[in-house]
Image (cartoon, coloured by chain):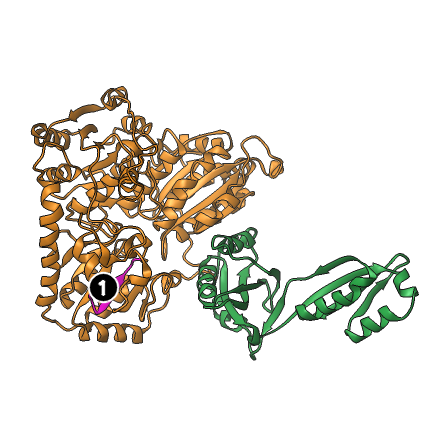
Chain colours: A green, B orange
Amino acid sequence: MEKQEFTITVYTENQVGLLHRITTIFTKRKINLESLTTSESEIEGIHRFTIAVTETEEQVIKVVKQIEKQVEVLKADYYKKKEVVQQELALYKIATETLTNGLEIERIVREHNARFLTIEREFVVIEKAGYKRETKALFDELEPYGIKEFVRSGRIAVARQQFGPGKDIEALLQASSPGI
Amino acid sequence: MASIDLQPTENKSPSHQTTITGAEAVVQALILEGVDIAFGYPGGAIMPVYDALYDYQDRLHHVLARHEQGAIHAAQGYARASGKVGVCLATSGPGATNLITGIADAQIDSTPLVCITGQVPSHLLGSDAFQETDVIGISMPVTKWNYQVTKAEEIPIAIAKAFYIARSGRPGPVLIDITKDAQFQPLDFQYEKCTSIRSYREEPAIETDQIEAAAKAINEAKRPYVLFGQGIILAEAEQEFKAFVEQGNLPAAWTILGLSAMETSHPLNVGMLGMHGNYGPNLLTNECDVLIAVGMRFDDRVTGNLEKYAKQAKVIHLEIDPAEINKNVYADIPVMGNAKKTLPLLTQRLQKKDRSEWLARFAECDRLEHEKVIQEELHPTNDILTMGEVIHILNQKTGGNAIIVTDVGQHQMVACRYAQFTQSKSNITSGGLGTMGFGLPAALGAALGAPDRTVVCVVGDGGLQMTIQELATIYQTKAKVKVLLLNNEFLGMVRQWQQLFFDKRYSSTEMINPDFQLLAKGFRMTTNQVTHRDQLDQAVTEFIETDEAYFLEVMVGKENNVFPMVPSGSGVAEIRLD
C-alpha cells in the first residue's frame, strides 16, 4: 500500500498530558508527524487536534483506532487530501531596505496574494496563507532578497462535508462525567 | 479519625462529608472500592499515605514487598487470581520507575491495576527535586489512563475514575501520581463511585447483523475452528463460551492467556496455540475454513508469519476492543462487544452439526505429537529429568485444581503445554511482555488473592534470580506459595535458540548458580531438592501436601529443548516436531 497525505482530526477533553499520550501512539510506530495543531473546536470545552502525516491508509486506520481508544478522546477520524479544505500560515521576515530598493518585493507579495503584516524600521513581516506549495513558492521568490526568519504553521483543515465529526459526539456530551 | 465509618450501607451514605487529609482520603477511597489488600513499598513522597494506612490495618492489609517490581507483579498475580483490581503503592522517583515493567506487563496482558505513586511537593515539580521523576510522562505509553493529583480535593474523583477505568471494558493499568503536599492537605471527603466517563466507551454496541453473519458462516462451515484468549476470563464468560463450542461442536484451542478458561480435559479443547503450542492447533489453522477468534488479539507468537496464516479461512473475530479488529489479521466478520453478551447470541443461532471427521484431524495430529514429542517428554527413556515429567507428576498430585503461576522461558512453555486445569483464572503467566521475574511475586499475589487454593510457582533458575528477594515477602506474609524451581543451569529458552539458530554459540546463557537450597533456607523456607527420578514422586507429594510455603528444586536436563516449535518467521503450518 502506498503512502499518501492524510489529515487526522481528534476531538478530546481538555486534559494535561493528552498531547503526549497521542503523540506516543505515533512514535511507538516510528511515524513522523508532519504537523500537529491543537485548538478549540466548534464545541465548547472540547479541544481538537489536527495532525498531518504521510502514511499508508492501513497504518493510519490502526493509529486512528488507537487514538480513539484513549479514555479522554471523544472521536478520531482521518481524511485523504481531497476530503478536506486545508490551510497553512507562513510568516516571512525580510529587511526593510529590500523594499526601498525598488518595487520587486511589493510585486511578489501582490502576485502571491500575500500581505504585509507589519512594517518596522528594520524589518517587514509578510504573511501568506495557503497550501504548502504556495507558501513554498513565495519562499523561493523571496529567498534571493534574504529571508531573515521564516516560520510555517501546522496544517489546519475542515472536512468537505456539511457537518464535521463533531456532529457525532454531541450525544456523548450529554452523558455526565467526573470533574477532573 | 480512624474510627470513621466507611460502610455506605450503614447510616451514613457514601456522600457524607468529613474533613480529612488527602492521604487519608486515598486510604478511605481504596476501602470504599472494596480493596482489602495492597502491595507496595514506602518512601519519602508516599509517607503520608503510609501513615494513614497505619490507622486502617484491620481493613486494608498492606504487603511490604522487597522491591517495587515485586510489589506490582504481586498486584498483577492478585488481580489475575481474584478477578479484582490489584493495588500497588510506591514512592516517587525510583519507586515509581521500578513499577514500570509491571505496568507495561499489565497493559499488554489487560490486567486491571491501580498504582498510586507519591510525587514531590507541587511547588518542586520540574525542579529536579530529590526523587523527582516524570512518572506521568514515563508511564503514559503503558497505562490505560494516568493522572497527576496536585490538590487533595481531586483525590476522591481521581481514584474513583482510576478504578472504573482499570476494571471496565478491556481492563488495564491506571496510575495516579499524588504530590506530597496534596497528601497533607485537608479536604471535605465525599466519595462517589465512577460509573461513566463521557469520552470513554467501555464496550462497543452489539450489532445484530454481525452476529447473524457469524452464525451463518459457522453453520455453513465444514471445518470451523475456535481460538480463545483471556477475553473469556476477563469477561467471566467461561460458561457462555463452553455452551458456544458445545452447541456448535467446535474444536477450540487457546492462547496461553486463555488457558484454564475451559477445562483442559474437555473433549473439544484441542490444545495450545503458538510458537510452542500443540501440533494440530497450529497446523490445522491453515486447514480450517472458518476461524473464530474469541477474546484474543493474534499476537505474533500465536500467528507466526502473517503471510502464511489462515489465508484460506474466513475469519470471525469476537472482540471488545475495536482497535484489535484488523490490527494483525483481517476479520471478514468482526463481532464487536463483550463476549459474555455476544457469545449467547451466537450460540442460540448455531445448528448442531456432526464434525467427527474434522475433530478426527485434531486427534490424528495429537497422536503424532504424542508419538514424536509428548511420550518422551512425560515418560523419558533416559536418566535425565525433563520439565514435562515434573509437570506431569504435579498434575497427578494437584488433580489439576491448583493455580499455576509461571515465569518466562522454557519452563513456562512446558507448564502451559502440560499443566491440567479444572477451573478458570488458574494459569497466571506473563504472556505479552514476557517478563522474567514475574513468577515468584505474582504467585505471592495469587496466593493472597485466592487464599483457599493451592498456588504453585513454576520458575526457572534465570527468572527466579530476578525477583528472588520476594521469598522474604512470602515468609513475612505466611502465604503458602509452592515454589517449583526447574533448574537447568541455563537461560534455557535463549540457549535453545542459540542451539537451533545461532550455531550453538552459547553466548551468556550458562548460569553458575548459587546454592538455591541454602538460599531458600536463608529465607526460612522448607526446602527439598530432586536430582534423580526415583525421588520425584515422593518429593512432589510432600511439596503439595505440606501446609506451608515450600521450595522444591528439581535438577532437569541442561540442554533439553521445548518442541514442537514454530520457528520465528515461519508459518504456523511449518511447525517442527523435532
Residue B79, given in percent of the width and then of the height, sits at 31, 44
Which amino acid, mark 1? Asn
Q: Secondary structure at mark 1?
A: helix
- In the depicted structure, whether residue A85 falls above or below residue B359: below
**Quarter of the view holding residue A156:** bottom right
For this rendering, which residue is in front, B302 or B121?
Answer: B302
Q: Residues within 10 Å of mark 1 (few under 14, many from 20)?
A: some
Q: Is residue B288 magenta?
A: yes
Look at the picture and state if A35 lies above or below B557: below
Residue position marked by numbered label 1 in the rendering: B286
Q: Is residue B154 visible?
A: yes
Judge by depth and name the residue closer to the eye, B223 or B12.
B223
Observer-nearest of B82 and A93: A93
Please state the extent of the stretch shown in magenta in the rendering.
Answer: B287-296
Please identify the quadrant where the N terminus of chain B is shown: top left
Residue B254 at x, y percent in the picture: 22, 55
Q: Is residue B291 above or below residue B160?
A: below
- Queried whether the magenta region covers residue B379, the answer comes back as no
